């Protein structure tokens, strides 16, 4: 059974930090694209950060560049998102997602077949 389980969401004041983690089980971790997406109320789901588990190549969306960092731990089958200097506009449900193996990384949520349940991040100003 494939499972992506996010943890680490919560509430923080603007300027603060949060770290999200996603534990992946039930599918091979290597040679796979993993991503963090977010969705705010009334808005479309958007890519925040993407990483390839084997190459380590990463993409950070422009609207969080310099504040967020994505990393993966191949020994623990986890992908993390470190979020610093949080802003009220970062408030959203954050989702971990995995793409089918051996496919290139993408920022299109429709191209990811495996999803976590989401974790709420609320930033108050």
Image (cartoon, helix red, strand yellow):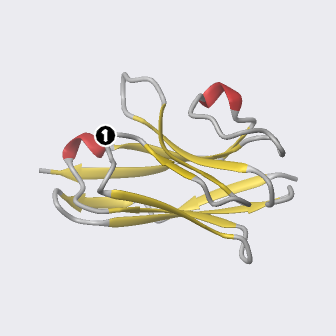
- When the figure is inspected, residue 71 is found, relative to residue 60, above or below; the finding is below
Residue 27 or residue 61, whichever sits in front: 61
Residue 6 or residue 98, whichever sits in front: 98
Q: Is residue 111 left or right of residue 108?
A: right
Question: Which residue appears at 76% of the width and 54% of the height?
Answer: 3
Instruction: Indicate the secondary structure of the residue bearing disc 1.
Output: loop
Question: Which residue appears at 11% of the width and 50% of the height?
Answer: 125
Q: In the figure, residue 42 lies in which quadrant?
A: top left
Q: Residue furthest bottom?
A: 75
10 Å crowding of disc 1: few (<14), some (14-19), many (20+) = few
- When the figure is inspected, residue 24 is found, relative to residue 41, above or below; the finding is below
Residue 73 or residue 121, whichever sits in front: 73
Residue 97 picture location, percent across and down:
64, 45
Total number of numbered discs in the rendering: 1
- When the figure is inspected, residue 78 is found, relative to residue 107, above or below; the finding is below
Q: In the figure, residue 85 lies in which quadrant?
A: bottom left
Residue 7 picture location, percent across and down:
53, 63
Residue 41 picture location, percent across and down:
36, 29
Question: Which residue appears at 69% of the width and 29% of the height?
Answer: 111
Per the image, the residue denoted by label 1 is 63
Q: Is residue 38 left or right of residue 40?
A: right
Question: Which residue appears at 45% of the width and 23% of the height?
Answer: 44
């Amino acid at each position: 059974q494939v499972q992506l389980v996010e943890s680490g969401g919560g509430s923080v004041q603007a300027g603060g930090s949060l770290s999200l983690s996603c534990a992946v089980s039930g599918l091979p971790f290597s040679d796979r694209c993993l991503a963090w997406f977010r969705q705010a109320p009334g808005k479309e789901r958007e890519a925040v950060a993407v990483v390839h588990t084997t190459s380590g190549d990463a993409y950070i969306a422009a609207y969080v560049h310099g504040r967020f960092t994505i990393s993966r731990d191949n020994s623990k089958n986890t992908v993390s998102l470190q979020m610093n200097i949080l802003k009220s506009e970062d408030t959203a449900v954050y989702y971990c997602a995995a793409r089918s193996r051996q496919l290139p990384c993408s920022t299109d949520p429709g191209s990811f077949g495996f999803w976590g349940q989401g974790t709420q991040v609320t930033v108050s100003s």
